[in-house]
Amino acid sequence: MTEPALAIADLQGFYGESHVLHGVALEVAQGEVVTIIGRNGAGKSTTMRAIMGLLKKREGSIRIRGHETIGMVSEKIARLGLGYVPEERGIYGSLDVMDNLLLPPRLGPGGMSLDEIYKLFPNLLERRRSQGTRLSGGEQQMLAIGRVLRTGADLFLLDEPTEGLAPVIVQQIGVAIGAMKAKGHTMVLVEQNFRFASKIADRHYVMEHGRIVDVIAREDVAASAGRIKAYLGV
């Protein structure tokens, strides 16, 4: 059997003495797009940080294409082919767009060229010599996604990619994620905008109080609308 791109089992996470993740378990097959949804404070972003090795204290199992990563530092985890776009985006404000795109190392073959990234995000071509601090929030998000696309990563973690963005920018982000999926990339998204998430994801993991409490497949979303609203408080 083919190993899942990502397999998490009994993941426990801690901030100091605070126990914040309680036995998280999920799987993502190669080429799938899944979301982790839930209310603020449910543990979604903490789960992403744990996958990347940025949570100092974590226990359980996180396997990336069969490689156990619980004991690895984040740099080695990234070199397994992970691209991470954190909620805060991590743009270097003193560098221009092009330098931000060229900064990360290559993790593997198949990364997009600058021309391909500019075709996906025309705004970045227009602003390629603008400093990161001069970009709008939407342009910064495009830059953050474009930067990991260049690295050759094939498993992407996107934390709140549409938060606070105008509808036209959200649409562009959706096109980019669709293009990534068409290339066979695997993605895990933390996403508050369920209308957006429901159009692109194969499956939704629902998180409450640091636990996965439900899994909803794409084909079951319509029938589960009431349940989803209750989970999200909308």
Image: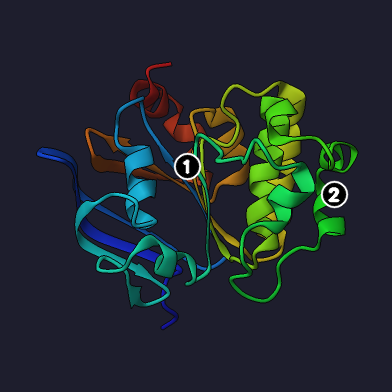
**To which quarter of the image does residue 62 belong?**
bottom left
Q: Secondary structure at mark 2?
A: helix
Report the disc number at residue 81: none
Q: Position of residue 125 (x, y in %)?
A: 87, 43
Q: 106 or 154, which lies in front?
A: 106
Q: Is residue 96 above or below residue 76?
A: above
Crowd band around label 2 with a 10 angstrom C-alpha radius: few (<14), some (14–19), many (20+): some
How many marks do you count on the picture? Answer: 2
**To which quarter of the image does residue 174 belong?**
top right
Q: Position of residue 141 (x, y in %)?
A: 65, 37
The kind of residue tagged 2 is Tyr
Which quarter of the image is occupied by the N terminus? bottom left
* Residue drawn at (74%, 27%) of the image: 134
Q: Residue under circle 1?
A: 220
177 left or right, relative to 157: right
* Residue drawn at (30%, 37%) of the image: 43
Q: Is residue 107 above or below residue 158?
A: below
Q: Is residue 120 above or below residue 167?
A: below
Q: Position of residue 94 (x, y in %)?
A: 67, 38
Q: Nearer the viewer, mark 1 or mark 2?
A: 2
The kind of residue tagged 1 is Asp
**To which quarter of the image does residue 115 belong?**
bottom right
* Residue drawn at (69%, 48%) of the image: 100
154 left or right, relative to 231: right
Q: Residue furthest top?
A: 234
Q: Secondary structure at mark 1?
A: helix
Report the disc number at residue 118: 2
Asked whether the viewer can see residue 178, the reply is: no
Q: Residue furthest bottom?
A: 1
Q: 75 or 34, which lies in front?
A: 75
